[in-house]
Image (tube, rainbow, N blue to C red):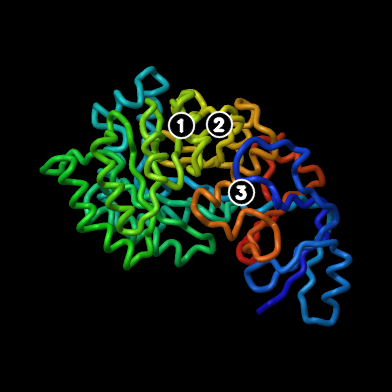
Amino acid sequence: MKRQLIGPVKSLLSMSGLPLKGALTDTMLPVSQDSGILIHGDVIENIDSYNKLKEEVLNTGTELINLDGDYIALPGFVDAHTHICFNGSRAHDYARRNAGMSYLDIARMGGGIWDTVRRTRQASKEQLIDGILNRVEDLIKIGITTVEVKSGYGLSVESELKMIQSIHEANRITPLDLISTCLAAHIVPKDFAGSTTAYLDTILKELLPTIKSEYGCHRIDAFVEEEAYGVGDVEPYLRSAQEMGFDITLHADQFHPMGSALAVELGAVSADHLEASGEREIDLLAHSDVVATVLPGATLGLGCAFAPARKLLDAGACVAIASDWNPGSAPMGDLLTQASIIGSFEKLSSAEVWAGITYRAAHALRLDDRGKLEQGQLADFILFAGSDFREILYHQGRLRPSQVWKRGNRLI
């Protein structure tokens, strides 16, 4: 396997040794100067002084990649919650919300998620794959190296399967890692001839075994909300999915404090959204192993409050930050900008923001082989021009990576 030494890196933030849960200060950040990144195949072999590593690899056939100028190195970003498999636009919904209509009122009128369902059902698998790949190109430019992608705009066995197949095929084409999640319990399909329980039973029996065995999808999500699924409706479905070997994540507490308590009870991997979480929900999440994934893109798209990231961290929770990129409530899709903004509003330290989009986000996907720059981790890292890591968040997304590396291969 190929060996490469990249450096010298003026300032390297490894994120090593930081805790998985709770608040972080910038003084805790492990920052090294004039470092080298030694790669063997697709993993990091060592991080050390560039000059020391250069001496060690002389005459070993290791490729030397010299950096001209000052660079800041960070682990590749992980976007742990997206809906980038879709067709169509909901610009009309956005305009209606800005004119005063609520998200739930628009949904009751036939807009919202159901509008995207209709358009996504009409799309071919090839169109969905192209859409994913085009959006992935945008993600690469901002330093995303791993991205979770949900279904949920099919809401029938046939159309949900088409979405999972599209995500699977796109993952074979793109250099990024696409982690598929089945969100067949997004909303109750308006055209299903039966009860909510009957629909979920159909998904359990006719869809989940196929996506697990044939497409390696091992994650299940559900939207727990008044206009989607109540706790009583969805709990048996989620427990059955767990018995089948699926990991569980939930859309929780977006408009009402619903879902996070269920996520804790089930031992879910994560509870996502949390804009409506109160003191009880914060305490439950902080005293559990459930990752609290906050989605500032939904706040910016809907004009609602940010999730209480500061309170969650201070209470001891593991907080990840994800974009929620989707055509309705979070159309921006720019994780770096969103993370910078929630940092300002929720008073998050730089360390807490970086943790939220690197190793803590990876943990929300149960991918503990990435998110840090240390021996044995995947060689997923990004380089920003400059020497002071504080400049990156200061520019609120305007400063983009100069280089993006995925599994030891340079993408840009």
Q: CA distance from mark 2 to mark 1?
A: 10 Å
User: Residue visible at 85% across and 70% down?
Assistant: 54
Q: Position of residue 220 (x, y in %)?
A: 35, 50
Q: In this view of the protein, can residue 126 be seen by the observer?
A: no
Which of labels 2 and 1 is toward the front? 2
Residue 358: which disc? 3
Q: CA distance from mark 3 to mark 1?
A: 20 Å
Report if the CB atoms under discs 2 and 1 are less than 8 Å apart: yes
- Label 3 sits on a secondary structure element that is loop
Residue 274: which disc? 1
Q: CA distance from mark 2 to mark 3?
A: 18 Å
Type of amino acid at the residue the image marks with label 1:
Leu
Outermost residue on the left side: it is 193
User: On the picture, is 339 further left or further right than 49?
Assistant: left
Label 3 Cα neighbours within 10 Å, binned few <14 / some 14-19 / many ≥20: many
* Mark 2 or mark 3, earlier in chain: 2
* Mark 3 or mark 1, earlier in chain: 1
Q: Is residue 87 above or below residue 164?
A: above
User: Residue visible at 25% across and 43% down?
Assistant: 118
Give 388 or 277, whichever is nearer the viewer: 277
Q: Quadrant of the N terminus?
A: bottom right
Q: Is residue 188 above or below residue 97?
A: below
- For label 2, the residue is 312
Q: Quadrant of the C terminus?
A: bottom right
Report if the CB atoms under discs 3 and 1 are less than 8 Å apart: no
Q: Position of residue 163 (x, y in %)?
A: 32, 55
Type of amino acid at the residue the image marks with label 2:
Leu
Q: Position of residue 59 (x, y in %)?
A: 84, 82
Type of amino acid at the residue the image marks with label 3:
Thr
